[in-house]
């Protein structure tokens, strides 16, 4: 184990100060798996985390499996302690530029930053920047170089990330680009699953590999696409993937080829009743971004507390929800979606600490392996 993370400029609250451990909230019957389960048997890899320094995150394919597991373990540590006193992002300035509506992603990134004692320039309505006058994203990227240390951007258009990167030399985190990807949502999804079943963090297949079900259309929904793409890095733990969609070809060519190449047993169907009772993990979504407006897709697949859901199965939903996910499920042990949303702040803390190079400012009670 390496303990001091190389250097600690934060002497008064430095490595010898013991951290204050906190307990997860238990405010309903919804699942709130204890984050300590995830790092009890192994520390995050310092080497894997350090490799994220100054790296942009555009797709889940920007992470190795070791990095995903290590980020989840670091997030579990951060979720277990009072971290603010260590000021991990002291002096760092983050720009959140949202050209599309958001509740969770922008606010959890901003909460994560502020709890780590970083600062935020928040642009909740990107349309009020120079784009309103016709300014290009490339020029806005050039301006951002002088204003902050990291950019987090959401945009309605899939190619917006590549456009701003033409002018930007800071690292950028994709917070959702059109129908493209939402990589930090997928991190939050798998962070929730790894806390629920810490065996998923191991190389050896879990005793009972999972049947994953998707109620949605990965080809059109960026959250579902990123979730499924990241699932491929956990393929030894997955028995099958069943995509339940109103569309005839819900995956699109690219995703279909990726899943086939991973050798996962894949079914696509529009018959929810047949497959629902077989699923261990159900990932659902219905809101899709279509240009500058939203529409509902696969909204005919609705779940409530009387649905034939397997005992022990969990539901993930990136939220916001419409009526496909009934509130009667909120107070049941199928509800992993609130833990998924709450945990997002901690996985985003972990990512910000790594991309901004502040692992050394963590307390020594947070152990990293070589
Ligand atoms: N999950 C998610 O992306 O939610 P927001 O649209 O509220 O950010």
Image: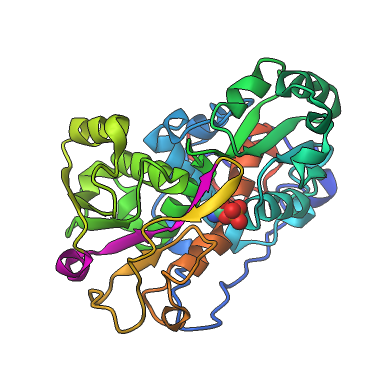
**Apparent side of residue 224 relative to residue 87 in the rendered image (left or right):** left
Magenta run includes residue 287: yes
Between 364 and 155, the one lying in front of the other is 155
Between 160 and 81, the one lying in front of the other is 160
Q: Give the residue drawn at x 23%, y 30%.
A: 257
The residue segment tinted magenta is 272-290
Quarter containing ligand 1? Answer: bottom right
Q: Give the residue drawn at x 74%, y 44%.
A: 88
Q: Quadrant of residue 334?
A: bottom left
**Residue 63 at what x, y percent from top left?**
45, 32
Between 317 and 91, the one lying in front of the other is 317
Q: Give the residue drawn at x 39%, y 42%.
A: 225
Give above or below for 179 relative to 116.
above
Q: Quadrant of residue 304?
A: bottom left
**Circle count:** 0
- Colour convention of the picture: rainbow
Between 230 and 129, the one lying in front of the other is 129
Give above or below for 319 relative to 186.
below
**Apparent side of residue 367 relative to residue 329 in the rendered image (left or right):** right
Give above or below for 264 relative to 321.
above
């Amino acid at each position: 184990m390496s303990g001091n993370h190389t250097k600690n400029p934060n002497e008064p609250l430095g490595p010898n100060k013991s951290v204050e451990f906190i307990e997860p909230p238990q405010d309903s019957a919804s699942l709130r798996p204890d984050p300590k389960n995830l790092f009890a048997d192994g520390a995050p890899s310092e080497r894997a985390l350090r490799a994220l320094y100054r790296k942009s995150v555009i797709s889940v394919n920007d992470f190795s499996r070791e990095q995903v597991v290590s980020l989840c373990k670091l997030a579990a540590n951060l979720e277990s302690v009072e971290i603010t006193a260590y000021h991990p992002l002291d002096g760092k300035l983050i720009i959140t530029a949202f050209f599309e509506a958001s509740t969770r992603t922008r606010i959890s990134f901003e909460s994560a930053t502020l709890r780590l004692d970083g600062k935020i320039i928040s642009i909740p309505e990107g349309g009020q920047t120079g784009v309103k006058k016709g300014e290009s994203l490339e020029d806005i990227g050039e301006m951002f170089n002088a204003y902050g240390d990291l950019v987090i951007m959401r945009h309605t258009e899939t190619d917006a990330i590549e456009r701003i990167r033409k002018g930007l030399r800071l690292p950028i985190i994709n917070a959702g680009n059109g129908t493209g990807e939402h990589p930090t949502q997928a991190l939050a999804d798998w962070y929730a699953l790894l806390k629920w079943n810490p065996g998923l963090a191991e190389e050896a297949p879990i005793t009972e590999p999972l049947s994953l079900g998707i109620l949605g259309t990965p080809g059109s929904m960026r959250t579902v696409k990123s979730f499924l793409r990241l699932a491929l890095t956990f393929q030894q733990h997955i028995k099958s993937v069943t995509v339940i969609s109103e569309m005839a070809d819900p995956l699109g060519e690219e995703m279909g080829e990726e899943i086939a190449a991973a050798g996962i047993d894949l079914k696509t169907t529009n018959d929810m009743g047949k497959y629902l009772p077989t699923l261990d993990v159900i990932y659902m979504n219905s809101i899709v971004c279509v240009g500058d407006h939203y529409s509902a897709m696969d909204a005919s697949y609705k779940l409530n507390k009387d649905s034939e859901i397997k005992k022990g199965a969990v539901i993930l939903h990136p939220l916001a929800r419409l009526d496909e996910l009934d509130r009667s499920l909120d107070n049941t042990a199928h509800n992993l979606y609130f833990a998924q949303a709450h945990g997002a702040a901690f996985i985003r803390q972990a990512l910000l600490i790594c991309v901004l190079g502040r692992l050394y400012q963590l307390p020594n009670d947070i152990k990293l392996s070589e």
